[in-house]
Image (cartoon, rainbow, N blue to C red):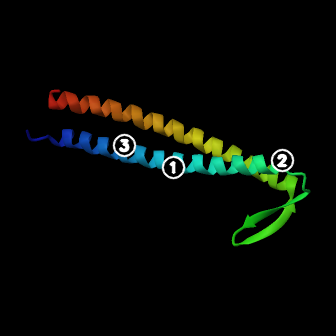
Amino acid sequence: MELTEEQKKLVRQFQMYQQQLQAVLVQKEAIKMQMLEVEKALEEISSTKEPKVYKLVGNIMVVKPTEEVKKELEESKEMLEAREKSLKSAEDRFVNKIKELEGQIKKILGE
């Protein structure tokens, strides 16, 4: 069965959305890993009694006040949470669009 141009366009859209969904899932996984690192660092910094801690900045380690580093980590966590929420929204949109296109393609193919 030869597909029409419109049908081929639907298949291409389906594949494009699948690729975009895969990219979003990879980004979400990276965000989760970063979130775990930040949470672990916050856990460690919260349990220390030291007034100063070491922080990696590029290729060097610097001494900074504990509270300053804690604040930076909390801000980083908030940013990661917002990014994760945004990616979840994009994931939901792509999943819905893929399901919609899948239904259209099945109808075309007579399944």
* Element type where label 3 sits in the image: helix
| Pick the front one: 82 or 61 | 61
Of circles 2 and 1, the one toward us is 2
Residue 15: image x %, image y %?
Answer: 30, 45
Give the residue displayed 76% in from the left and 48% down from the top.
Answer: 42
Question: CA–CA distance between discs 1 and 3?
Answer: 15 Å
Q: Tell me, yes or no, whether the two marked residues, 2 and 1, touch with CB atoms within 8 Å.
A: no
In the image, residue 28 sits, relative to residue 109, either above or below, namely below
Question: CA–CA distance between discs 2 and 1?
Answer: 30 Å
The residue at which mark 3 appears reads as: 17
Give the residue displayed 8% in from the left and 38% down from the top.
Answer: 1
Horizontal side of 38 relative to 90 (left or right) equals right
Residue 23: image x %, image y %?
Answer: 44, 49
Give the residue displayed 69% in from the left and 50% down from the top.
Answer: 38
First in sequence: mark 2 vs mark 3: 3
Residue type (three-letter) at the residue carrying disc 2: Ser
The residue at which mark 1 appears reads as: 27
Q: Residues within 10 Å of mark 1 (few under 14, many from 20)?
A: some
Numbered label tally = 3
Residue 76 can be seen in this image: no
Question: CA–CA distance between discs 2 and 3?
Answer: 45 Å
* Element type where label 1 sits in the image: helix
* Element type where label 2 sits in the image: helix
Residue type (three-letter) at the residue carrying disc 3: Tyr
Residue 87 can be seen in this image: yes
First in sequence: mark 2 vs mark 1: 1
Q: Tell me, yes or no, whether the two marked residues, 1 and 3, touch with CB atoms within 8 Å.
A: no
Of circles 2 and 3, the one toward us is 2
